[in-house]
Amino acid sequence: MNPPVKKADFLVIGGGVAGLRAAIELASSAGSKGSIIVLTKDKPTESSTEYAQGGIAVALSDEDEIGIHYEDTIKAGDGLCNEKAVKAMVEEGPQRILELISWGAEFDKDGSKLDFTREAAHSRNRVLHSHGDSTGREIERTLINKARTSPSITRYDFSFTLDLIMDVGRCAGARILRKRELVDIYAKAVVLATGGAGELFAGTTNPSIATADGMAIAYRAGALLTDMEFMQFHPTTLFYPTAPPFLLSEAMRGEGALLKNIDRERFMHNYHEMADLAPRDIVSRAIVSEMVKKGSRHVYLDISHLDGSFIRKRFPQIYKTCLNYNIDITKEMIPVIPAAHYIMGGVRTGLDGRTSIKGLFAAGEVACTGVQGANRLASNSLLEGIVFGARAGSAAFNYAGDISEAEERGACVSEGVQRQAPVSSIDAEKIRYSLRKVMSEKVGIIRCGESLKTAKEKLDEWSYLQDAYSIDRRNLELRNMITSARLIVGSAFLREGSIGAHYRSDFKERGSEWKRHTVCSRDGGIYWI
Ligand code: FAD
Ligand code: SIN
């Protein structure tokens, strides 16, 4: 029996910065005539956006220029950025931020002026922040409130997208799981904004929703993905065995915090001229190198030399959270380790979010416009989400105006496979645990052909689960995690060279193909373009 059907003009999958900004754009373009459904698989605020700490980069300060923001982004991207995408982001960024402020977003000020901080690899103070270290929460709050004012936007929370509905090569909607029932939602255009893939790794800064669903969903529907080997590891997360993953913002180093090894010695000046503010990939590898050299399980982040009242005011969440674990950051060093943080690759899109599938648009961390190259510059992803979310919304609106009534009929759900018997939930949890462990150990900050081969063999053992039937969210997530992990491993295997966040100990140089991009295709495998 086919699931019940719902219709909307537009379907936005994801309610973080990119999805909400796309929905707001659609609502303002469509006016009262268009209906927009926004799906989130959990409560509306459970997203990476909500947890973003450090801030949002934008060239708005007196000492900054759009051209310098452009240069810094290109440099951090290590030669693989799409220059046109970077240009669009840095040029449209200021306008998007001012718009956000006009919708009620409160960024911290120094007197009457916006206060800009510094983060790694930025050559200017250009990172806006809110309530010290709760920037993402403020942006999410503002966008949710703005979306609420639009009667054409309807939110479906706790609604898990299983797959896209395809109609002769065109995306015509999505099948979702809501209140344990399947529903098919048909729409003229779909915007995918499902966020990242951190949950594929045992140590991650990401919330547990970041299971790379969007990448797997798009792949199954036949969309092209690109640059999946580029996973950024954030250098500093709290090392405290019983604590849930917790990020220690790079803005702490921007304000003067220092990295020290287990012998309490500074080390970053031995690795890069920018020392503690070197690009993230370099800092993460330097930390691993110090841990190996000293046989330690972590290094330290030390901010205790700064004034205590400044620290408490500037980083209130971080101060409070660490205090819960008996670490007073105004007095003591904080044990830290790197963790999986952000995927630069994703669903391949043009500058307006168009994917290789008609009617399917993508924005935010799930997408790859090429703006982040091989290594994202800190605080550029909230900006990417807001700029390209708006662009994708606008392009989806224009696309829908061009499709004819005859084209508007639904056909089949792209998965077309779910044949295998369901896996028990205990087995699924065991596999999820093993997958995350294998990805961290074999596909982490430093990889090599041998480690990638081991990861591939393990993932192959579980590949039958990609076809398993289930209406359980955790099982469905596992299916997506296996698919996306295979794409990351396959792409990392293909790139026999080291660039940006992708470091191969068996190919330490860039390699002859370094300027090219890897592509994953359901029908064509993994190849170079
Ligand atoms: P998200 O904000 O992750 O939203 C994804 C949405 O998709 C959610 O609503 C989710 O429910 C929904 N979804 C996912 N799968 C499904 C499915 N199958 N069905 C239905 N819905 C689904 N970047 C910065 O620029 N500055 C920072 O300071 C910063 N700090 C960070 C701190 C942390 C701890 C983390 C984790 C990330 C940080 N980042 C930062 C990165 C940045 O937050 C993310 O890249 C960005 O917020 C991603 O936005 P998004 O809209 O693409 O996805
Ligand atoms: C942080 O606050 O360190 C995270 C910033 C980012 O990922 O852009």
Image (cartoon, rainbow, N blue to C red):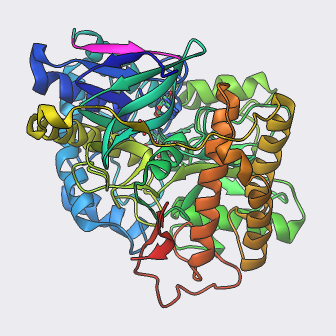
View extreme (front): residue: 1
The residue at the point 60 percent across, 61 percent down is: 488
Asked if 183 appears above or below 187 in the picture, the reply is above
- Residue 413 position, x and y percent, is 45, 37
Residues 17 and 190: in front is 190
Q: Name the side, left or right, on which 100 lies relative to 498.
A: left
The image quadrant that residue 403 belongs to is top left
Judge whether residue 305 can be spotted in this image: no
Q: Name the side, left or right, on which 8 lies relative to 228.
A: left
The image quadrant that residue 244 belongs to is top right
Asked if 470 appears above or below 275 in the picture, the reply is above
- Residue 3 position, x and y percent, is 48, 20
Does the magenta portion include 269?
Answer: no
The image quadrant that residue 117 belongs to is top left
How many circles with numbers are drawn on the protein? 0
Judge whether residue 332 can be spotted in this image: yes
Residues 515 and 254: in front is 515
The residue at the point 53 percent across, 50 percent down is: 342
Q: Quadrant of the C terminus?
A: bottom left
- Residue 174 position, x and y percent, is 41, 31
- Residue 21 position, x and y percent, is 28, 30
View extreme (bottom): residue: 512
The residue at the point 57 percent across, 82 percent down is: 497
| Range of residues picked out in magenta | 152-158
Asked if 31 appears above or below 240 in the picture, the reply is above
Residues 221 and 459: in front is 221
